[in-house]
């Protein structure tokens, strides 16, 4: 296959992949390079793609097995296993921007997705960036006494926490019935491929920390979130037409931005890949 390039986007997170058309076969050597870059850089930005929903699915499968979203009804018409995010949904007069505060995806699952990906179909003329923060570096930089305090703690992650900073939009009765039982996950997890520890936080879904009173748990989560979302840990993705962005939910949190003209549409295909029990 023709030569391609993988280049860092910051000194800690993100790599840009150019020179591969993912609608064509990708050889084993290129796949190995991409997998290594993903484990090391946590966010891959594949430029200049042109996907139909089926082509997007096929490209995603180069990296793992697809995982269904909880909100099954949010799929591309005619493609029940290709989901989307958009700025179209208004509930009780309030526009829902999926992913508008920092989180990691579907952490309510006992085996949360290892990766999520978006493909830009329609973008606003400006704004609507996605921010990523590196949870390995955030963990590394914690004071030793904080590390001692949190190592070994476990949190209960539910579909929508009573403490969530935002609503999640509507979900059908049928989808809700299929939501798995809560995930109980360590606050600090070790990445199975790069071997690094990372903070594993999600204020949208964390209902409690086992053995801790709510007030103390919320104060701890707030302190860790303020630390982890500092600019020094961030890669901010400014979307371009044709971008396919895939991130590692075991290594980064992410958030969407609602800072654009809402008369313009923002619509991206979205897929997730199966993960493992966090350890
Ligand atoms: C998400 O949380 O997956 C949405 C991110 C985005 O739309 O930028």
Image (spheres, helix red, strand yellow):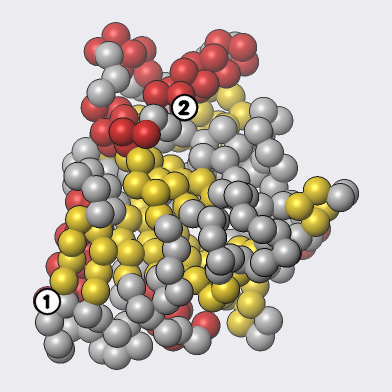
In the depicted view, which residue is nearer to us: 132 or 39?
132
Are the residues tagged 2 and 1 within 8 Å (C-beta)?
A: no
- Residue 249's disc is none
Question: In the picture provided, is 100 more to the left or to the right than 137?
Answer: right
Q: Secondary structure at mark 2?
A: helix
Which residue was labeled with disc 1? Answer: 29
Q: How many marks?
A: 2
Q: Nearer the viewer, mark 2 or mark 1?
A: 2
Q: Residue 51: horizontal and vertical position, in percent?
A: 45, 84
Q: Residue 242: horizontal and vertical position, in percent?
A: 42, 76
In the depicted view, which residue is nearer to us: 170 or 68?
170
Question: In the picture provided, is 269 more to the left or to the right than 251?
Answer: right
Residue at (58% x, 65% y) in the render? 124
Please determine whether, in this image, residue 133 is positioned above or below residue 223.
Answer: below
Q: Residues within 10 Å of mark 1 (few under 14, many from 20)?
A: few
Quadrant of the image containing the N terminus = bottom left
In the depicted view, which residue is nearer to us: 225 or 192?
225
Residue at (66% x, 68% y) in the render? 265
Residue at (12% x, 82% y) in the render? 3
In the depicted view, which residue is nearer to us: 179 or 10?
10
Work out how far the residue at label 2 is from the one at label 1, CA to CA, in angstroms.
Answer: 38 Å
Q: Residue 40: horizontal and vertical position, in percent?
A: 20, 51
Q: Quadrant of residue 61?
A: bottom left
Give the mark nearest the N terminus, 2 or 1.
Answer: 1
Whether residue 16 appears in this view of the structure is yes
Q: Residue 239: horizontal and vertical position, in percent?
A: 45, 63
Whether residue 179 appears in this view of the structure is no
Q: Residues within 10 Å of mark 2 (few under 14, many from 20)?
A: some
- Residue 225's disc is 2
Question: In the picture provided, is 150 more to the left or to the right than 42?
Answer: right
């Amino acid at each position: 296959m023709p030569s391609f390039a993988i280049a860092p986007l910051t000194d800690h997170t993100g790599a840009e992949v150019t020179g591969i058309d993912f609608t064509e076969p990708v050889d084993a050597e290129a796949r190995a390079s991409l997998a290594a870059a993903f484990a090391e850089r946590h966010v891959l930005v594949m430029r200049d793609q042109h996907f139909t929903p089926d082509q997007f699915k096929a490209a995603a499968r180069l990296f793992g097995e697809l995982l269904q979203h909880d909100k099954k009804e949010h799929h591309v018409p005619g493609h029940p296993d290709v989901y989307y995010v958009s700025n179209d949904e208004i509930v009780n007069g309030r526009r829902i921007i999926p992913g508008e505060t920092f989180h990691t995806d579907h952490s309510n699952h006992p085996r949360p997705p290892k990766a999520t990906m978006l493909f830009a179909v329609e973008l606003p003329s400006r704004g609507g960036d996605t921010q990523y923060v590196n949870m390995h570096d955030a963990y590394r930089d914690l004071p030793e006494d904080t590390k001692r305090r949190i190592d070994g703690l476990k949190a209960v992650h539910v579909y929508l926490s009573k403490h969530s900073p935002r609503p999640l939009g509507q979900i059908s009765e049928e989808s809700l019935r299929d939501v798995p039982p809560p995930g109980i996950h360590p606050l600090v997890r070790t990445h199975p491929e790069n071997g690094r520890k990372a903070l594993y936080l999600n204020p949208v879904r964390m209902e409690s920390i086992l053995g801790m009173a709510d007030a103390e748990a919320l104060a701890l989560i707030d302190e860790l979130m303020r630390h982890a979302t500092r600019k020094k840990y961030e890669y901010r993705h400014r979307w371009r037409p044709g971008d396919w962005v895939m991130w590692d939910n075991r290594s980064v949190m992410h958030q969407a931005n609602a800072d654009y003209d809402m008369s313009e549409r923002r619509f991206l295909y979205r897929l997730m890949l199966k993960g493992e029990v966090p350890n």
